[in-house]
Image (spheres, grey):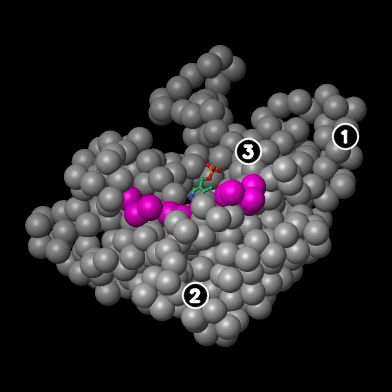
């Protein structure tokens, strides 16, 4: 049996161990230190922003802290894109708040501005103005940012970007993760760069970053003893893990180029296949890192379903996966309000993510080409 081809696996650059070695040599084995500061500076510089970056234990922690900083409390309502990974929505419930889900639009697969505004108006009419909006840039594709930002400003609601999948993606030349009051980045094992596990929060200013780091390190008041007047969390990134991050930052641009090449690879494979569409940027304003390359299948025209293709790949030890199952269809979230139609549901039913790693070898790509060609024949 051929070895497994993964959807997206860690791809080390080479200098990660050098930074870890430095941490050992200087005994900075703690959730603070030169690698943490260095990684934060690297990220800030890469994002080309005045905003401040705080390195955390995970992207989920970043979303949670973003909600806290936006003032979300128990019984508040928070609008969240329905089509996403559950980690976008779970922190709403950590806060004891209520998620209100909004459907996708077909161009970027992200939050539909029309249904967003409908949701806001309807919640206000019911007596409750939402406290925050969680916008996701799925698979690296920037959302319809101009429209969403304008609605968030019009109704004066905090925008939190979940840019976990979109490091290096831009909209009109500006980096995803720098549009909202707060944004979350993730360095989980399957993301475009990884620290094995980790994340970062992008904060609108220095004061809010300070607050984020304070909350992420158990909310210790300024006193010689342990004194607390707020609930704290253990959410800070360790200096060892941040060393991996510094090494990964050296290869981020290369990884983006390679992921984008994978998208062209699939465009080429499916060029003449009726009923199969490779997901791509709707206009030149959008630049996706193409974290994962995805296709949608029109069953009538293609004469096969996404499950037919997924199982054919799996039989040859090639991993692929259906698109994110929308939150409003998940057992844990289906009782919450939802605004939209069936856009995200159809994407889930007909879409498939294909192996997209920056570390796929020429031989592996040939295997993928051959298996898909045999399936189509
Ligand atoms: C990975 C991911 C997260 C969570 O990040 P972690 O670092 O794994 O906690 C959140 N949202 C989306 C869309 C993701 O893909």
Question: Looking at the rendering, in which quadrant would you find the N terminus?
Answer: top right
Earlier-in-chain disc, 3 versus 1: 1
Earlier-in-chain disc, 2 versus 3: 3
Is residue 324 highlighted in magenta? Answer: yes
Q: Name the residue located 80 percent from the left edge and 59 percent from the top edge.
A: 363
Q: Is residue 298 left or right of residue 199?
A: left
Q: Which residue has dot 2 on it?
A: 276
- Tell me residue 180's x, y (percent): 46, 62
Q: Which residue has dot 1 on it?
A: 22
Q: Name the residue located 68 percent from the left edge and 38 percent from the top edge.
A: 196
Q: Name the residue located 63 percent from the left edge and 38 percent from the top edge.
A: 197
* Mark 3 close to ligand 1, CB under 8 Å: yes
Say which mark, if any, is on residue 197: 3
In three-dimensional space, the C-alpha distance between marks 3 and 1, rounded to whole angstroms, equals 20 Å
Question: Looking at the rendering, in which quadrant would you find the C terminus?
Answer: bottom right
Earlier-in-chain disc, 2 versus 1: 1
């Amino acid at each position: 049996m051929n070895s497994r081809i993964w959807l997206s696996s860690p791809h080390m650059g080479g200098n990660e161990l050098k930074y870890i070695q430095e941490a050992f040599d200087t005994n900075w084995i703690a959730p603070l230190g030169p690698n943490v500061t260095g990684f934060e500076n690297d990220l800030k510089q890469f994002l080309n922003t005045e905003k401040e970056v705080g390195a955390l234990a995970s992207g989920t922690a970043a979303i949670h802290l973003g909600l806290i900083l936006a003032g979300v409390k128990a019984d508040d309502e928070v609008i969240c894109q329905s089509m996403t990974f559950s980690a976008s929505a779970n922190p709403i419930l950590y806060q004891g708040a209520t998620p209100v889900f909004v459907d996708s639009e077909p161009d970027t697969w992200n939050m539909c501005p029309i249904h967003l505004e409908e949701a806001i108006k309807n919640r206000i009419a019911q007596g409750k103005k939402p406290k925050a909006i969680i916008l996701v840039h799925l698979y690296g594709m920037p959302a319809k940012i101009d429209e969403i930002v304008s609605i968030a400003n019009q109704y004066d609601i905090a925008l939190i970007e979940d840019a976990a999948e979109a490091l290096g993606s831009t909209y009109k030349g500006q980096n995803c993760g720098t549009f909202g009051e707060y944004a979350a980045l993730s360095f989980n094992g399957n993301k475009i760069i990884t620290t094995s596990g980790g994340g970062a929060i992008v904060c609108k200013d220095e004061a809010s970053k300070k607050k984020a780091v304070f909350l992420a390190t158990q909310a210790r008041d300024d006193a010689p003893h342990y004194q607390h007047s707020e609930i704290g969390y253990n959410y800070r990134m360790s200096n060892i893990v941040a060393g991996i991050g510094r090494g990964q930052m050296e290869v981020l641009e290369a990884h983006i180029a390679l992921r984008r090449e994978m998208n062209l690879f699939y465009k080429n494979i499916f060029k003449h296949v009726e009923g199969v569409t490779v997901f791509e940027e709707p206009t030149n304003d959008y630049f996706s890192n193409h974290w994962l390359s995805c296709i949608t299948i029109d069953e009538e025209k293609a004469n096969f379903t996404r499950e037919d293709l997924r199982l054919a790949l799996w039989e040859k030890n090639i991993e692929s996966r259906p698109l994110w199952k929308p939150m409003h269809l998940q057992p844990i979230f289906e009782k919450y309000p939802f605004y939209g139609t069936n856009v995200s549901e159809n994407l889930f039913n007909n879409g498939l993510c294909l192996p997209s790693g920056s570390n796929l070898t020429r031989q592996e790509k040939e295997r993928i080409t051959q298996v898909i060609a045999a399936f189509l024949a």
